[in-house]
Image (tube, grey):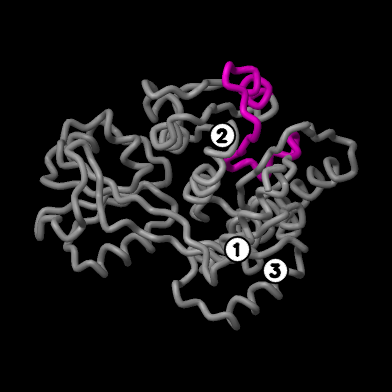
Amino acid sequence: MKHLRKLLFPFSAIYYVVTWIRNYLFDSGIWKSQEYDFPVICVGNLSVGGTGKTPMTEYLIKFLKDLTSLGVLSRGYGRSTSGYLFVEHSHTADQVGDEPLQYKTKFENISVAVCEDRRKGIKLLTEEALEPKILVLDDAYQHRSVKAGFSILLTPYDDLFYNDNVLPAGNLRESRRGAKRAQVIIVSKCPVGLSVNAQSVVRKKISQYTHGNVYFTTIDYSNNIYGEQGRMELSDIPNTGVTLVTGIANPKPLLKFIESKNITFDHKQYKDHHNFSASELESLEKCSFILTTEKDYMRLKSRLKNKNLFYLPIEVRFLSGEHNAFKKEVLDFAGLS
């Protein structure tokens, strides 16, 4: 597939020029970016999907939510609605998107909203009764009409942005040079034992595009799964009849983890943010035991009657004990250190 995509380089050249002109207009001030007098943190990437934005956003929420009033604004990708919506517990993933519903479900005391127009979304969210003192923008790196004070750019270790090309020959939404806008670069989904020397090589290459600090993270999977029936240990999963359902951009790390636990499963793979059809749901109802991701669980829980539906939580872990340095950068920016 990668070799076939090389045939699309002429179209990538056109895409490159269009995105370069757009960035130039914002960088030169011809097109205006809205700035704010309160801390706005952006979590994003240069590539399309699969970089780990959701667990990174949750990592930020976990250590900021008890320090100040916190808001999260997302586009609400894949929802059937449009415009601005303040996310409530009564909403479904179809109404507000799986990730925003996940944030609101896990962190009750934060304000979560969705809006395609980030300027409008920020204006309306900050007018809500619980006005946030810090705002986190989920997947807004290319939304240049809004200028975040602190941008976190994610790039997965097995698909680093400096080895990629712009769409459609590659997976980048804009040129590699777009990394210069980031204050921090997170190399996500790293092998647990990634050596210091290997990290140094990556840092050196990233430094060709940005002066932002570089951190390395991995994904930690829980040893417990959760569902309507409560908590269950992975070791108690049935030996047969397990169906793994994934609607995420890159399920390979999850597959590797599940296989390492000697769990036998049938894998049903769908595209990222997949909207399950009636026939697909009917098929899943017949499964004896379903294991899925937390994002997919948000989409399935209100549409499946199957009681044996469980999700496996994940979280970000910094390598080399760098979590304190990263947190200090964020807290210094937010004026909370």
Which residue is disc 3 drawn over? 206
The amino acid beneath tag 2 is Val
Instruction: Identify the secondary structure beneath mark 2.
Output: strand
Left or right for 239, reference 64: left
Residue 34 quadrant: top right
Residue 250, image x and y in percent? 42, 57
| Residue 69 sits above or below residue 83 on the image | below
Q: Which amino acid does label 3 sit on?
A: Ile
From the image, tell me which residue sits under label 2. 72
Query: Mark 1: which amino acid?
Result: Leu
Q: Say how many tags the image has.
A: 3
Image position of 181 with respect to 71: above or below: below
Q: Position of residue 133 (x, y in %)?
A: 65, 31
Residue 48 falls inside the magenta stretch: no
Q: Residue drawn at (11%, 53%), measured in percent from left and top? A: 241
User: In the drawing, does residue 252 fall left or right of residue 86?
Assistant: left
- In magenta, the rendered stretch is 120-147
Q: Quick one: SS at disc 1?
A: helix
In the foreground, 22 or 29: 29
Nearer the observer: mark 1 or 3; the answer is 3
**Mark 1, residues whose alpha carbon is within 10 Å: few (<14), some, or many (≥20)?**
few
Task: Give the residue number, with chain letter if any, for mark 1.
Answer: 7
What residue do we see at 68% from left, 54% from top?
329
Marks 1 and 3, Cα distance to the nearest angstrom?
A: 27 Å
Which mark, residue 295?
none
